[in-house]
Amino acid sequence: MPSHNTLEESTRSTAHDDDSRPMQLTLNVWRQAGPTEPGRFVTYQHQNVSEHMSFLEMLDVLNEDLILRGDEPIAYDHDCREGICGMCGMMINGIAHGPQRATATCQLHMRHFKDGDTITIEPWRARAFPIVKDLVVRRGSLDRIVEAGGYISVNTGAAPEANNIPVPKPNADRSFEAAQCIQCGACVAACPNASAMLFLAAKAGHLGLLPQGQPERYRRTVDMVAEHDKQGFGACTNMGECEAVCPKEISIDFIARLNRDLIRAKLTNPSGY
Ligand code: SF4
Ligand code: FES
């Protein structure tokens, strides 16, 4: 439970610039000065929130008030604010990216909340995602899984003619679905085992479905799974929480596909791995 104590803050927003009735919110925000510092919830009364604000804009306004008061602003990751880059992400009332399905934190709008709501905001919590500060976690462990997959052995040089390598339409569509993963890590944060299997399966799947990804398909699968385990992510136990929070609606069918490739790699070594 968030603690309401002497740390309670009162903030006054001046960013309400439309005719709709302003919202007033109570925010319980995880504050942690650094990786080895103790963390705690701090309660803020945030007034005059516009329903047209994005969730991050709501936090921006809170931060402006904190800075004006001489307080430390809340640290959180963001970049594109268009649901593309995967930088944003926080637990909002216990749900990774908040209550709106298929929506990254940066695309979540305050109209999905009500005046008077209490909102609890926490960082992703997983052993493989150590906290840097407040709501910022280090997600380099996901990069290392991708690195373990290595490159595809295509001959680079002049740009190839796009139609030189025919790709069956169903495979192209399926590969494109997997390639939409933005590496946000919400699937890990939502999983009771902090497994990154949905992320891994998307990354392995989008290459493994294309002709260009075939030479290293099975070696890539084995290496990425080994790195996943090494980075401290947990095992997938088919809970489905990952799929429910994924802002790109990556299907857990990709995990089944990954498991088939993994079994085939172990049993038949088709890549000469
Ligand atoms: S699979 Fe979905 S939730 Fe997981 S990292 Fe990719 S986009 Fe984010
Ligand atoms: S800030 Fe880029 S996806 Fe949210």
Image (spheres, grey):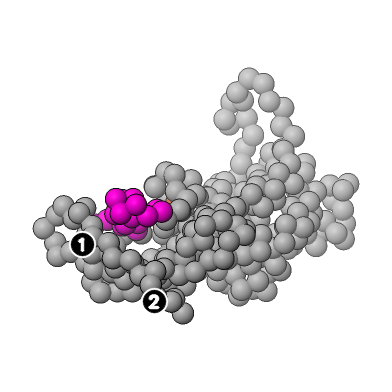
For the residues labelled 1 and 2, the Cα–Cα distance comes to: 21 Å
Q: Is residue 113 visible?
A: no
Q: With 124 as the anchor, is 195 left or right in this view?
A: right
Q: Is residue 205 magenta?
A: no
Q: Amino acid at mark 1?
A: Asn
Q: Residue furthest bottom?
A: 1
Reading the image, the residue beneath label 2 is 4
Q: Is residue 71 magenta?
A: yes
**Residue located 23% across and 68% down the image:** 24
Which segment is the magenta one? 52-73
Count of marks placed on residues: 2
Q: With 224 as the anchor, is 31 left or right in this view?
A: left
The disc placed on residue 218 is none
Q: Is residue 93 visible?
A: yes
Residue 166: image location, x then y, percent:
62, 37
**Residue located 61% across and 25% down the image:** 160
